Amino acid sequence: ITSPKAIIKNADMSEDAVNIATQVLEKYNTEKDIAACKYPSQWQIERKIRDADISLYGINIWNVHDAIINDLPRTNNHVEGYNSRLESNFPKHSHIYHFIELLRDEHLYQHHRAEESDMQIRKRKQLYNNIDSKLKELHEEHIKGTITNV
């Protein structure tokens, strides 16, 4: 079996960096701990994975709970649409002056969109309003204790 130190070691890494990386790998190696148990039960596996949670984004970032209560969008479709628009308008390797011109055009477009939104708010489909109101209703019932956690 190859040691973690041998896997991590790179010609460009100092010995201290290799030692630190090895310690981190050994500390957070859930596969090794699960394999050490001859017949791990499901709860042991789930607990080990839960305890080793080192996710980049906390639940408050991706959960829509606060968005529903504060009447914010439940999805990031508006962001994805904006990114898609930029990707289609901006070539991959354009000349710097062409890129600056495109940025100016985009700024002007967004400025006009902002002015337009002050005058006329875009109407949401009734379906999405109904979904939001149902989610708020369920949330209030949960707070009152009428419905419980799953």
Image (spheres, grey):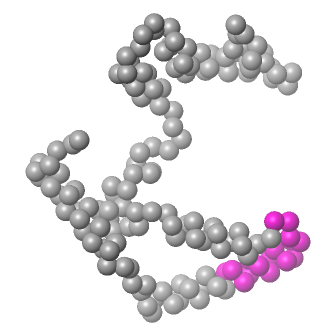
Q: Is residue 126 left or right of residue 85?
A: left
Is 107 situated above or below 146? below
- Residue furthest out toward the right: 95
Quadrant of the image containing the C terminus: top left
The answer, for residue 130, to whether it is visible in the render is yes
Residue 111, image x, y percentages: 60, 85
Residue occupying image coordinates x 39% and y 84%: 123
The magenta-colored residue range is 92-107
Residue occupying image coordinates x 45% and y 63%: 75
**Front-lying residue, 73 or 110:** 73
Q: Quadrant of residue 104?
A: bottom right
Residue 77, image x, y percentages: 51, 67
Residue occupying image coordinates x 36% and y 79%: 125
Q: Quadrant of residue 68?
A: bottom left
Number of labels in the image equals 0
Secondary structure mostly taken by the magenta-highlighted segment of the chain: helix
Q: Is residue 132 left or right of residue 62?
A: left
Quadrant of the image containing the N terminus: top right
